[in-house]
Image: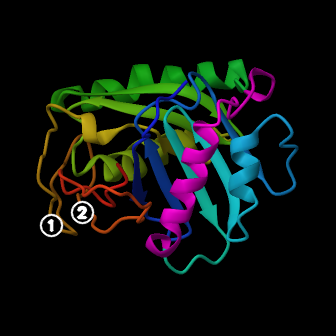
Amino acid sequence: MLAQQIKIRGEPTADPQKCRFVLDGEVLSRASVSFTKDSDMEKAPLAKQLLDLSYIAQVNIAGQVVTLTGDNVESWPAIGKEIGEVIRSQLESGEAPITEEVMDTGNSELFDQVNELIKNDVNPSIASHGGVITLHNVSDGKAYVTMGGGCQGCSASSVTLKQGVESYIVAKIDEVNEIVDITNHSEGVNPYYTEPLPQQSTSSGCGCGSGSGSSGGCGCGSSKSDEQGGSCGCH
């Protein structure tokens, strides 16, 4: 169970209708789960409380990351504090956010196919940058991974994932249409690039593609200031 004073960091994504909320502890120790307003959420109270918010259309929970898809959200910073309060309140209630019964471990055969591509084709190509990618789950057409080594905390990691890894795997496996990064990049200790790269740069970053920096945050609200200059200071 997560401790009191849970820290939450909001991270914008390339999709303006999606925002990642990264906690300082795991919500799920394995697998990942997704919910929409039509889902059965009897055994998923965290998802239910988030989807009770009128502007949230989908919730995905994987590891320590809660990814929210909005319904015509205009500004994540404007609603981030309320989202942060909902997440904290549920996790601090003592009730399990997701019960074991609803944890979907995905299709094992499909998992093996994706994992083989990552181990045999992807990881050797990013090894020269000290990077490594680990597959955690495949569910509903999405493969959930973490990026380690030189890719964890690298400013070009998102480009590597989307323009390199995702395009390659999606082209090879019809059942997969998206790669989702659930890495806590703030914990990277040896990123290949530590500073954001100029947009449209042709530098290889942590494996392939150009790098682009990101700024801003999701304003999840906190009574404390962000001492490390993070995206929203939700400590």
- Classify 10 Å Cα crowding around label 1: few (below 14), some (14-19), many (20 and above): few
Start-end of magenta stretch? 76-103
Disc on res. 109: none
From the image, tell me which residue sits under label 1. 198
Per the picture, the main secondary structure of the magenta-coloured stretch is helix
Q: Is residue 220 above or below residue 157?
A: below
Q: Residue at x 22, y 34 (%)?
A: 188
What is the three-letter code of the residue carrying label 1? Answer: Pro
Q: Secondary structure at mark 2?
A: loop
Q: Residue at x 29, y 46 (%)?
A: 157
- Most foreground residue, 225 or 109: 225
What is the three-letter code of the residue carrying label 2? Answer: Ser
From the image, tell me which residue sits under label 2. 212
Name the quadrant containing residue 184.
top left
Q: Is residue 104 left or right of residue 124?
A: right
Q: Which x, y percent locates residue 86?
A: 61, 53
Q: Residue at x 24, y 63 (%)?
A: 212
Q: Is residue 195 left or right of residue 181?
A: left
Task: Specify how the rendered protein is coloured.
Answer: rainbow
Q: Secondary structure at mark 1?
A: loop
